[in-house]
Image (cartoon, helix red, strand yellow):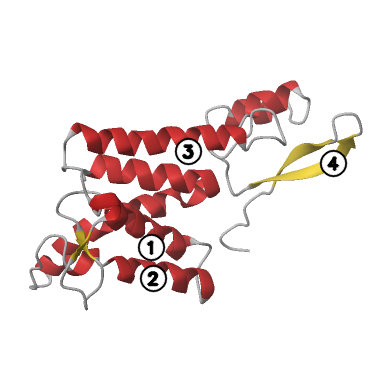
């Protein structure tokens, strides 16, 4: 698949779960290809879709990040992106190697797509569309908040933030680590919690 589609799939699927990890997932989503350049720069050329495209390698890396050790989800995001790359590559006719111990190429759903053809874009952007629908469905707590975008305008209209905070953040479409959404009261009629956004100032580099 083309990089634009790898980036779209890795980014969209990650954004549904945790938007802050999208950059690392996108980096991992292209890693199986650019790692080939790294090997070449180190004096060891590898063929395309070989050692950097092992399905088991990326799956084991993701499992290790989730179960053993990680740093703020960064490694999990990176290995997840890499796993999406090799899995969507397995949809193509060329396929990918499943593991170092397998001589046959792995094909998901029969491997019927051709790289660069219309079917590739249909699948990739269909996944993006599904992720967008899912993310909009998962916004039941606050009107306007869902994994892709953060509804500063809605929070201002509800009186949960002041005009200054709205002006400062109206162009920040993604949720930032220095903001925390906390429950402040419950509406007995709608059975929904009201939430407020609290700003946590970053600690100075030197005290």
Is residue 166 visible to us here? yes
**Nearest to N terminus: mark 2 or mark 4:** 2
**Residue at mark 1 to residue at mark 4: CA–CA distance:** 37 Å
Quadrant the C terminus occupies: bottom right
**Nearest to N terminus: mark 3 or mark 2:** 2
- Per the image, the residue denoted by label 3 is 131
| Residue drawn at x 23%, y 63% as measured from the top left | 53
- Per the image, the residue denoted by label 1 is 79
Mark 3, other Cα within 10 Å: few <14 / some 14–19 / many ≥20: many
| Residue drawn at x 62%, y 48% as measured from the top left | 178
Mark 2, other Cα within 10 Å: few <14 / some 14–19 / many ≥20: some
Q: Nearer the viewer, mark 3 or mark 2?
A: 3
Q: Nearer the viewer, mark 3 or mark 4?
A: 3
Residue 155 against residue 103 in the figure, above or below: above
Quadrant the N terminus occupies: top left
**Nearest to N terminus: mark 3 or mark 1:** 1
Q: Which mark is residue 184?
A: 4
Mark 1, other Cα within 10 Å: few <14 / some 14–19 / many ≥20: many
| Residue drawn at x 45%, y 46% as measured from the top left | 13
């Amino acid at each position: 698949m083309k990089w634009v589609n790898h980036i779209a799939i890795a980014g969209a699927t990650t954004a549904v779960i945790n938007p802050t990890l999208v950059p690392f997932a996108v980096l991992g989503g292209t890693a199986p290809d650019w790692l080939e350049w790294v090997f070449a720069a180190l004096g060891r050329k590898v063929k395309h879709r070989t050692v950097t495209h092992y399905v088991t390698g990326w799956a084991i890396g993701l499992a290790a990040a989730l179960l053993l050790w990680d740093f703020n989800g960064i490694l999990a995001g990176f290995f997840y992106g890499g796993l999406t790359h090799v899995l969507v590559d397995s949809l193509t006719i060329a396929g990918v190697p499943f593991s170092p111990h397998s001589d046959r190429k792995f094909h998901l759903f029969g491997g019927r797509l051709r790289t660069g053809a219309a079917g590739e874009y249909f699948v990739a952007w269909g996944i993006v569309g599904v992720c967008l629908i899912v993310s909009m469905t998962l916004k039941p707590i606050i009107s306007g908040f869902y994994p892709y975008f953060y509804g500063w305008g809605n929070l201002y209209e509800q009186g949960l933030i002041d005009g200054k905070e709205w002006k400062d953040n109206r162009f920040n479409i993604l949720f930032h680590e220095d903001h925390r959404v906390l429950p402040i009261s419950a509406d007995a009629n709608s059975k929904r919690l009201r939430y407020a956004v609290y700003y946590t100032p970053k600690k100075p580099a030197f005290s």
